Image: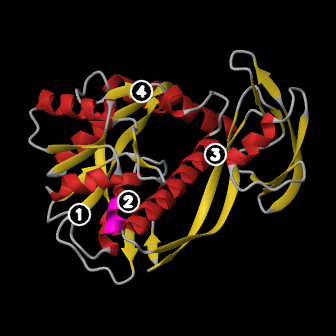
Amino acid sequence: MVNTIYKKIKDFIQREWKFLLIIFLLIFITRFPVDCYVITGGGIISATDRVHVTGARKKSGSFNLAYVSELKGTIYTYLLSYIVPSFERESTSDYKYDESESSEDIEFRNNLLLNQANNNAKYVAYTNANKEIKVKSQSLYVYYISKDAVTDLKVGDKVLEVDGKGFQTFSSLREYINTKSSGEVLSVKVEENGKKKTKSAKLYKDAKENVIYMGVSIMLDKNYEVSPKVDIKFRNSEGGPSGGLMMSLEIYSQLINKDITRGRKIVGTGTISEDGEVGEIDGVKYKLRGAVKNEAQIFIAPSGNNYKEAVKEKKKNNYKIKIIEAKNFKQVLEELAK
């Protein structure tokens, strides 16, 4: 029985070896990883569909977030990037703080950055619309750990106390660390996966900067209470801070019940701070391509290198889209009103 099965398998391999070889090669080139991402272009996400302010009326135009489409690097996608003119390669190092980071750490950080961007957008929109907004709660989270750190802290830890003291902001924690010396060990009480634990972090001095570090990056995450109520919905796979500006414009537009788009499809990108300043991001030329592909009339790009890159890309491809240079929230509102 065994000999019969073995003979049939052997005969099949001898007869179909070319077909099997092709299958093996296809699996190999589509699965074997290469140290890069292949950028395939840009797209847009409707901020209008992601935001709902209670009592807001619909508008004829739309605000849209721009994003970059990418494929994981394999032999197949790597070779394809040399054939398709619009495909470009980016090193995986551009997506990590260092090579030791896990995909889970990166995902947590991106989600935290998205939440911070949306909170900043709320604050900017509500304060400029003269609507009620106040901090309901705020927490400090570990979002990056340096390779130089001597600690058992993990990305995602919620920091409750340091040396028995509570800190409401990272700047206040930074001031406390400045009073310490290199080699001292901080006792850090955290919440990890719902459980309270006590961990430690050894301080060290950066020889070049002459500054004391704990080797851990911590971010403040706020939870606002607002009136009227606003619901913001994003998918679990979406993250990062680059949609902050467009979210603030969408929320503001709904709060004042005025169509500041004036019927236009507006695509843009850029971070937003609590004081309304717009920050630069990556991948502007890909995002502009996505805006053009989706027939937007206006593209908003952060002031500086982002704006220069967008203008250069527009001239290179003879795009007809209008590009607005974004410095801060109020200035963008003025530009949109022209």
* Mark 4 or 1, nearer chain start: 1
- First to last magenta residue range: 247-252
In the picture, the quarter occupied by the N terminus is top right
* Mark 2 or 3, nearer chain start: 3
The answer to which image quadrant residue 225 occupies is: bottom right
Q: Position of residue 70 (x, y in %)?
A: 39, 39
Nearer to me, 37 or 143: 143
Task: Inspect the image, locate mark 1, and give the three-letter code of the amino acid beneath it.
Answer: Ser
Instruction: Tell me the SS state at disc 4.
Output: strand
In the rendered image, the vertical position of residue 204 relative to residue 169, given as above or below? above
* Mark 1 or 3, nearer chain start: 1
Residue 2 shows up from this direction: yes
Name the residue carrying label 4: 90
* Mark 2 or 4, nearer chain start: 4
> Along the horizontal axis of the image, is 144 left or right of 9?
right
Q: Main secondary structure of the magenta part?
A: helix
Label 3 crowd (10 A; few <14 / some 14-19 / many >=20): few
Name the residue carrying label 1: 62
Q: Which mark is residue 104?
A: 3
Q: CA distance from mark 4 to mark 1?
A: 31 Å
Task: Inspect the image, locate mark 4, and give the three-letter code of the amino acid beneath it.
Answer: Glu
- 250 in magenta: yes
Q: CA distance from mark 2 to mark 4?
A: 27 Å
At horizontal 24% and vertical 41% (from top left) the residue drawn is: 288
Name the residue carrying label 2: 247
**Marks 3,4: beta carbons within 8 A:** no
Q: Position of residue 217 (x, y in %)?
A: 68, 39
* Mark 3 or 4, nearer chain start: 4
